[in-house]
Image (cartoon, rainbow, N blue to C red):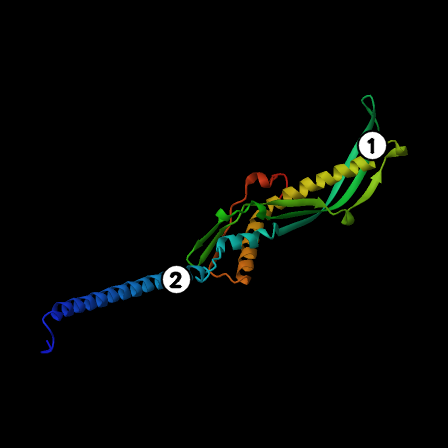
Amino acid sequence: MSLNSSPKSYPFSILKNLFLMATGSTTLILLGLFLGGWGLGSRILSGINAFFNAPPPTPKVEVSSLIFEQIRGLSQLTTAVFVMDAVVPTSQERKLGNLVVGKTKLLYIARGEVRAGIDLTALNSNHIKIDDQNVHIQLPPPEILDHKIDVEQSKVYDYDRGFLGLGPDVAPQLQTLAQQSTLDKIMATACNKGILDEANQRAQLAVTQLLTTAGYDHIKVIATPPNSNHCPISTAVSP
């Protein structure tokens, strides 16, 4: 305390110092609150910025769905074709009561074709399993996809209405009968020769090659045995 200070001014000095100390403390408190609020605001702004500018999620590829679409794109996979030529005789009689007065014969040479394979429209995503790097595919059973007469390679070889032409003139009917008989015969022969088993084996190879070419590794294609009702086997036709 200065020697020149009067006793009366002493209390005022103390009050002044206290005021200055209080003001300084308030300033420090306000500064602390300001800095704290600024830090909180910065964190909030950073969080908002990170939310709206977050990197896009990594795209995911459903491998099983992709494989499913690639295989289904084939629709029907024909893997075995059986072709056979057949000579089919047909005939029809003309009667008066119980007496045969004439007979018409038609000899038809036909070429028939049977196609077998896999109907891939029956395939669904449940038939495809992904295990680590392994792809397992269960194929639908093979079936006959088509059978027909190749009319360009078939013809009527002989048509005979008999003595004096007394047999009925039924060429279209006998030709239709011959064609149907040919279809039945080549179907039974194809089934006896194991066309569905051959179609299964070739379908496994074809699907494996397809997916290998598409870039997939470790592929296992599992065949399903053919249904017996998909291929009638006739014991009357020798294999």
Give the image quarter of residue 147.
top right
Q: Nearer the viewer, mark 2 or mark 1?
A: 2
Q: Which residue is mark 1?
A: 103
Instruction: Indicate which disc residue 45 carries.
Output: 2
Q: Amino acid at mark 2?
A: Leu
Q: Amino acid at mark 1?
A: Lys
The front one of 224 and 187 is 224
Instruction: Indicate which disc residue 1 carries.
Output: none
The front one of 192 and 18 is 18
Give the image quarter of residue 101.
top right
- Residue at the spot 81% in from the left edge and 30% down from the top edge: 93
Q: Is residue 239 visible?
A: no
The front one of 23 and 90 is 23
Q: Which x, y percent locates residue 132?
A: 41, 57
Name of the residue lying farthest toward the right: 164
Q: Is residue 85 left or right of residue 37?
A: right
Q: Which x, y percent locates residue 217?
A: 48, 61
Q: Secondary structure at mark 1?
A: strand
First in sequence: mark 2 or mark 1? 2
Above or below, comparing residue 101 to residue 31 in the picture: above
Q: Secondary structure at mark 2?
A: helix
- Residue at the spot 83% in from the left edge and 25% down from the top edge: 95
**If the image is split into quadrants, where does the N terminus sit?**
bottom left
Q: Which x, y percent locates residue 44?
A: 36, 60
Q: Between marks 2 and 1, how big is the CA–CA gap?
A: 103 Å
Q: Which x, y percent locates residue 186?
A: 67, 44
- Residue at the spot 81% in from the left edge and 37% down from the top edge: 172
Q: Counting other residues with Cα less than 10 Å from the Cα at mark 2, is it few (<14), some (14-19), or many (20 or more)?
A: few
Above or below, comparing residue 107 to residue 221 in the picture: above
Q: Is residue 230 visible?
A: yes
Q: Is residue 199 left or right of residue 50?
A: right
